[in-house]
Image: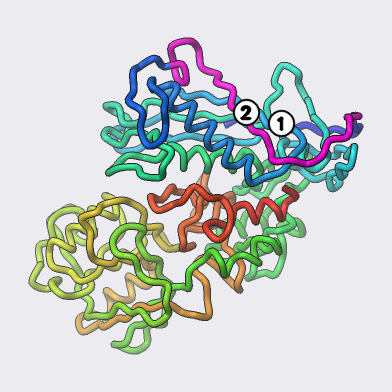
């Protein structure tokens, strides 16, 4: 992903223009016969009328641009230079896509009713142009606001084999297909300003010593300090302070109750001494209702399998008599969440707990398998270890807490801050503990809508906080 920085001190003069819905244009950057120009025949699908692979892909990109444009206001057109091109991937993993602001801008004065940018503060160029009403043009040869790369090899042999793009516009991707529209919406969100960049989330260092506009809204609840008031070292530590880095902007905070579900918590009824803890429900399987009265309870069983780990549930469960009718405990790792839960279900489990395999955070349990009919939940590594150490006779209950919202700390929505730091994911995403699932989490979930605003999502409200 490409990022540039430009400081402009003088204002440009424009004719007065009234604010209107943002216009976002996608400019294909691929050569003839490739990417968006791929002539391979395709059957129209899910409301997408394109008859070639390239045209269907371009239709998806423009639909994502239109969705964002309808939810934002700007007098300045936003141009995306986009490439649908081969990216790094293997048969089991790969880069889906990436996008970011083409330029980061500081110190531009507003004209014709526009506002001055806050002094010495970086903004994504599309946001800077919206605030100032100035067509900022750092380089006439590169008149773009967003740069985007997406993987056109997806689903082909050797590149996430069997998990190709779904080009429909109807939020109805089948089986293991990946919804291109959801991924493009997500990446365009980064290009429009959903990012702490150009400040480094990893080191806390700032470009030219200027903070990003995000920093005034990023609060570490354990220290009580906002990123704008921290040193580089303090920002780097906060980026790894799982569960304690939150978004403190008023607009996003105001819509938390209309977007996020009540938090699911697990009580260990016996033995005593293991504290109540937050858990996260899987995005697949039966819905765990948002009403506080709903409960899942039962005796715990440690599920065993014949694989290398023996406790990760990636092969058939070898102790089905112990698991049948109980809540199976399995560790994260090696295979997908749906594989683990389906193996436990086949062994007769009534529900599944999956313990994280890293010291901080809850596993964001994404995936799709309509054959799964039992509930499953992600728990922390420490909780998993405590349950294993407790031995036999463990009984747990899971229910909604009506006093807390999922994915929040102190009532504020969390940003993704695992330890260790996850390059490309940490800080500039919502936390995976949020439910409902949010567009700007670090993984795309199958139950997302195509809305970017409340009551379906928090993202537009965050954009309002930073000046959109």
Tell which residue pokes out farthest to the top in this image.
32
Residue 65 figure quarter: top right
Q: Is residue 61 magenta?
A: no
Q: Residue at 18% of width from left, 63% of height from top?
A: 344
Q: Position of residue 5 (x, y in %)?
A: 74, 33
Mark 2 lies on a secondary structure that is strand
Q: Which residues are magenta?
A: 12-37
Residue behind mark 2: 25
Q: Quadrant of residue 394?
A: bottom left
Instruction: Give the crowd class for mark 1: few <14, some 14-19, many >=20 residues within 10 Å.
Output: some
Task: Give the class, few, some or many, for how many residues have Cα within 10 Å of label 2's Cα (few <14, many ≥20).
Answer: some
Taking the spot 15% from the left edge, 59% from the top edge, the residue there is 305
| Front residue of 218 and 333 | 218
Distance from the alpha carbon under mark 1 to that under mark 2: 8 Å
Residue 29 colored in magenta in the image: yes
Name the foreground residue: 232 vs 375. Answer: 375
Residue at left offset 67%, top offset 45%: 72
Question: What is the image's colouring?
Answer: rainbow
Element under disc 1: loop
Height in image: 324 above or below 237? below
Q: Nearer the viewer, residue 143 or 42?
A: 42
Q: Is residue 270 above or below residue 251?
A: below
Verify CB contact (< 8 Å) between mark 1 and mark 2: yes
Residue 169, quarter of the rendered image: top left
Pointer 1: what residue?
77
- Helix, strand or loop for the magenta stretch, by majority: loop
Q: Is residue 153 above or below residue 124?
A: above
**Vertical order, 398 against 427 (above or below):** below
Q: Work out whether mark 1 precedes mark 2 in sequence or the reverse, and give the earlier one.
A: 2
With 14 as the anchor, is 466 left or right in this view? left
The residue positioned 61% from the left and 68% from the top of the image is 412
Q: Position of residue 6 (x, y in %)?
A: 78, 31
């Amino acid at each position: 992903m490409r990022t540039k920085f430009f400081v402009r001190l003088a204002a440009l003069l424009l004719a007065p223009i009234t604010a209107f819905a943002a216009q976002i244009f996608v400019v294909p950057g691929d050569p003839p016969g490739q990417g968006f120009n791929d002539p391979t025949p395709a059957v129209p699908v899910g409301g997408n009328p394109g008859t070639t692979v390239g045209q269907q892909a371009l239709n998806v990109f423009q639909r994502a641009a239109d969705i964002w444009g309808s939810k934002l206001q700007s007098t300045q057109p936003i141009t995306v230079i986009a490439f649908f091109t081969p990216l790094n991937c293997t048969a089991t993993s790969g880069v889906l896509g990436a996008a970011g602001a083409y330029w980061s801008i500081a110190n531009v004065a507003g004209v014709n009713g526009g506002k001055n940018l806050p002094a010495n503060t970086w903004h994504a160029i599309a946001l800077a142009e919206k605030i100032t009403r100035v067509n900022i043009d750092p380089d006439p040869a590169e008149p773009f606001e967003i740069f985007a790369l997406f993987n056109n090899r997806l689903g082909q042999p050797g590149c996430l084999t069997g998990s190709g793009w779904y080009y429909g516009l109807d939020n109805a991707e089948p089986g293991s297909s990946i919804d291109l529209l959801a991924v493009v919406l997500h990446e365009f969100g980064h290009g429009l300003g959903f990012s702490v960049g150009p400040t480094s989330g990893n080191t806390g260092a700032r470009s030219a010593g200027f903070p990003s506009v995000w920093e005034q809204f990023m609060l570490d609840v354990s220290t009580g300090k906002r990123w704008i008031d921290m040193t580089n070292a303090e920002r780097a530590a906060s980026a790894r302070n799982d569960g304690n880095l939150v978004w403190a902007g008023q607009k996003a905070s105001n819509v938390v109750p209309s977007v996020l579900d009540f938090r699911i918590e697990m009580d260990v009824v016996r033995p005593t001494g293991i504290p109540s803890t937050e858990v996260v429900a899987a995005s697949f399987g039966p819905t765990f209702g948002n009403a506080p009265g709903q409960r899942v309870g039962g005796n715990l069983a440690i599920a065993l399998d014949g694989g290398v780990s023996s406790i990760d549930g990636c092969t058939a469960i070898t102790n089905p008599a112990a698991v049948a009718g109980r809540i199976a405990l399995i560790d994260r790792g090696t295979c997908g969440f749906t594989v683990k839960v389906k193996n436990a279900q086949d062994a007769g489990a009534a529900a599944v707990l999956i313990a994280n395999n890293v010291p901080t955070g809850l596993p964001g349990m994404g995936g799709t398998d309509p054959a799964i009919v039992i509930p499953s939940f992600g728990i922390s590594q420490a909780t998993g270890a405590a349950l294993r150490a407790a031995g036999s006779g463990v009984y747990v209950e899971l229910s909604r807490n009506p006093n807390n919202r999922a994915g929040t700390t102190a009532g504020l929505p969390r940003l993704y801050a695992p330890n260790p730091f996850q390059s490309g994911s940490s800080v500039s995403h919502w936390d995976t503990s949020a439910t409902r699932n949010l567009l700007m989490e670090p993984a795309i979930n199958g139950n997302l809508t195509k809305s970017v605003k409340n009551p379906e999502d928090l993202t537009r409200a965050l954009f309002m906080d930073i000046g959109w």
